[in-house]
Image (tube, grey):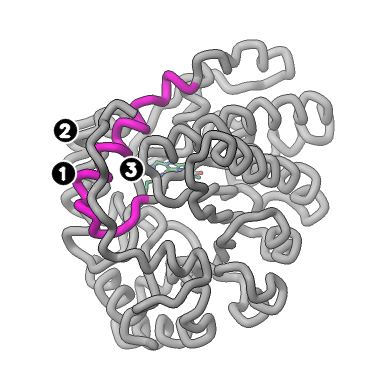
Amino acid sequence: MKDAKPFPVLKNDNLLRAARGEVVDRVPVWVMRQAGRYLPEFQELRKLHDFFTVCRTPELACEVTMQPLRRFDLDASIIFSDILVIPQALGLTVEMHAGVGPVLPQPIVVPEDLKRLTPDGALSRLSYVGDAITMMRHKLEGRVPLIGFTGAPWTLMGYMIEGGGSKTMSKAKAWLNEHPEDSKLFLNLLTDAIVDYLEMQVKAGAQMLQVFESSAEHLSKEQFLQWGVPYLKRIRDELVDRLTKKAIPVVPMTLFAKGAGHSLKEQSELGYDVIGLDWTVDPLEARTLVGPNITLQGNLDPQDMYRDPDELRNLTTEMVHKFGKSRYIANLGHGITPQTPITSMEVLVEAVHKAL
Ligand code: 1CP
């Protein structure tokens, strides 16, 4: 670790306690994409700096990470970055186009293209994320825990083959059928890079980790069990193994596999402490499927943030009542969307804290 100064003592540890199944003072709440486009101060900063410049400059990444915490009484921060920094570190160009999202102009088209990837040295090309995490731990002054994150193998493979976001992930799904052995190679290469990356984040000061399998929604249950689950399991197992061998405390881990409500039982058997739910899943059914020893996170429909405040308050309260105070982290069922009124964040956070 570059910065040898000890980190400030954590004051609000409700997130970590919820993840471990301990008693909480209040239901912790944070929001996926809580730093981002719905905040005018983020928009202002983005006018001055390119997206990846913000990610790569620890002062800027910390400023953006801090922005939602200045406005809302949140129980967690999440380091500002993107899941596509791994494809970048593996040698692919990633551009962020306004109004479009990420664009990879030279995607992986055929198995031959895998040779273009540069796993050697990838971790050192991601050191700026560790620097931002370490700086953020100091800037937070122990106010709330800091979450680190990564994209999951299948989700990253999808972006790398499609060359950006896709409504269907059809090219990536065709790979699974047409090049199953190369798909395994690809997913294993990504899994190795992800384990290195998460270990680095923990060493840098991340107090919890979330794995985003956002593109699980494009896979059938059978495909998710074949192309998602084994790699998600390997990530958790190898990370725990490595940290344990180095006597580094293991941090709680969340798996958020969007659209994989069909496999909650299977997800609960992978060793993750927390399972993130999208809004299509019923809280009570999810609890029955995962059992009592897993924490659930979610799952308000991001669209509910556009309802009038009274409705939003009622829906939030109802959701928290269904999940209960034990082993629960309140969140949306996916990222907050750009046009969300800021007042909705205030209503959501207050309603969660007052519900129980
Ligand atoms: O111009 C901009 O400012 C771009 C908007 C933006 C932001 C604010 C992008 C582009 N990424 C981010 C930050 C980001 N991305 C965070 C920050 C931390 C936070 O506050 O939560 C995180 C956790 C992510 C993760 C991410 N990026 C995911 C997984 C979560 C999810 O939403 O499913 C995915 C799929 C991406 C890819 C991505 N990056 C950006 C966009 C618009 C997208 C989605 C593109 C698409 O598939 O259509």
Quarter occupied by residue 174: top right
Quadrant holding the N terminus:
top left
Q: Is disc 3 surrounded by few (<14), some (14 to 19) or many (20+) residues within 10 Å?
A: many
Which portion, as a residue range, is magenta? 123-146
Tell whether 31 sits left or right of 68. right
- Per the picture, the main secondary structure of the magenta-coloured stretch is helix
In the rendered structure, does residue 94 fall within the stretch colored magenta?
no
Q: Quadrant of ligand 1?
A: top left
Quarter occupied by residue 187: top right
Disc 3 within 8 angstroms of ligand 1 (CB): yes
Q: Residue at x 69, y 62 (%)?
A: 268
User: What x and y, as percent, mark residue 301?
Assistant: 48, 70
Q: Disc 2 marks which amino acid?
A: Leu
Q: Disc 1 marks which amino acid?
A: Glu
Q: Residue at x 38, y 61 (%)?
A: 31
For mark 2, give the secondary structure.
helix
Residue 44: mark: 1
Q: Nearer the viewer, residue 289 or 54?
A: 289
Q: CA distance from mark 3 to mark 1?
A: 16 Å
Quadrant holding the C terminus:
bottom left
Q: Is residue 66 visible?
A: yes
Q: Which residue is mark 2?
A: 48
Q: CA distance from mark 2 to mark 3?
A: 16 Å
For mark 3, give the secondary structure.
loop
Q: Is residue 329 above or below residue 192?
A: below
